[in-house]
Amino acid sequence: MRGEKAVIVDASEESITLAASMLKAGRIVGVPTETVYGLAADASNAEAVARVFAIKGRPAGLPLIVHLDVGASIAAWALDVPDDAFRLASRFWPGPLTLVLRRDPSVLTAVTGGLDTVALRMPAHPVAQRLLAVFGGGLAAPSANRFGRVSPTTAHDVFADLGGEVDLVVDGGPCEVGIESTIVAFDGGEVTILRAGATSPGEIAGVLGRQVRTVTGGLVESPVRAPGMLESHYAPDTPLELCAPHEAELRGAELTSSGLRFGMLSLGGVSAQGAAVVWDAGGDIAVLARSLYRWLREADVQALDLVVVALPPDEGLGVAIRDRLQRAARRSKSP
Ligand code: TXA
Ligand code: MG
């Protein structure tokens, strides 16, 4: 199928069997997870993993997450797993949390980007879990978008971005959570959030019984720690202007008189008179997370001059949403 257009298939047992056999044969498959769609390859096949990097346009050395079946043993993938990691896994797996652990020597260098750690996650999406069970191994999968761009939350998004190169896309419906997993690392006794995500710092602190450090806000500690930490990422073509909700209304009024075609994106309750498109999450932060990437994609389809974004509060899911928006906005040129 290489070189031909990908096929989108439903999530029937027959399709899952087909996807598993294609993965076994070294093919690349778009897979739904509860966070975003992944671009999956057999984690034990170096050639298939290399193709994932090529399709995404991802620089080598930026490691992939290995997705595991709920029945899998962490010990097959990681060494010296700290108690804190087991506590987090037993509370949040399957779910949107990725643990960075010392890698077992059997894990391919192609997957870990040459690091001595491996990122592991058990996804909660029933289709991902069924595929992992039928496949019977680990699936290395980054988000199924071109490097630096908006992550896909539907099978169609994967097709639109990568359709010419991916072999198959399994349609598991729109992603429930809509933003990526939280990535947590363990250094000595210290637990660090490397990428804010769908599991909030408060939930993690609740399980560990102490606060955890979060490395966000464009801090690039080292180019290989997490590309989500690179300054510009998750970005649409349309420029974004981020502000507090009360500023968004003022900005909207100014833009209306300037004649620019703008969109207004908010958690809710922001008056958006004069906006060509209004995206309002009705005050529900889970709806904002679930819709954010779809809305950013719509802004490009509508060819808006810019989107004014009223930032949600810096708590719970809002932490990750603000992180994504801040990185997405850094790409922006002024209209
Ligand atoms: O929700 C998610 O995490 C989605 C779905 C598909 O599971 N995946 C995802 O993958 O967002 P990706 O490749 O777009 O982002 C994975 C992040 C990158 O920032 C990568 O650098 C980091 O995980 N990562 C992977 N292995 C790592 C390691 N050994 N140490 C530190 N960071 C690592
Ligand atoms: Mg990504």
Image: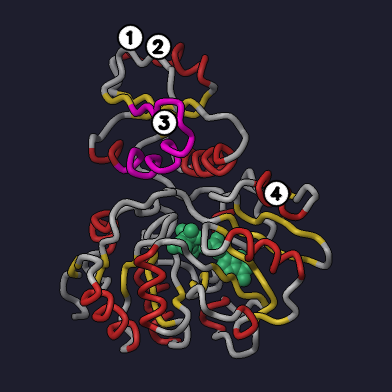
Residue furthest out toward the right: 189
Query: Label 2 amino acid?
Result: Glu
Q: Is residue 54 left or right of residue 227?
A: left
| Residue at the image position 44 percent from the left and 70 percent from the top | 141
User: Label 1 belongs to which residue?
Assistant: 257
Query: Label 3 amino acid?
Result: Ser
> Is the C-beta separation of discs 1 and 2 under 8 Å?
yes
Q: Which mark is residue 98?
A: none
- Decide whether the magenta segment is chiefly helix, strand or loop: helix
| Comes first in the chain, label 4 or label 2 | 4
Q: Which mark is residue 254?
A: 2
| Comes first in the chain, label 2 or label 3 | 2
Return the x and y of residue 207 as percentages of the image width and height.
Answer: 72, 53
Q: Determine the secondary structure under disc 3.
A: loop
| Residue at the image position 56 percent from the left and 44 percent from the top | 320
> Is the C-beta separation of discs 1 and 4 under 8 Å?
no
Mark 2 or 3, closer to the camera = 2
Q: Is mark 3 within 8 Å of ligand 2?
A: no
In the figure, 291 relative to 266: above or below?
A: below
| Comes first in the chain, label 3 or label 4 | 4
| Comes first in the chain, label 1 or label 4 | 4
In the figure, 52 relative to 26: above or below?
A: above
Q: Which residues are magenta?
A: 279-297
Position of the N terminus by quadrant:
bottom left
Query: Label 4 amino acid?
Result: Thr
How far apart are labels 4 and 2 at the CA level? 36 Å
Q: Residues within 10 Å of mark 4 (few under 14, many from 20)?
A: some
Position of the C terminus by quadrant:
top left
Q: Which mark is residue 334?
A: 3
Return the x and y of residue 63 as percentages of the image width and height.
Answer: 55, 71
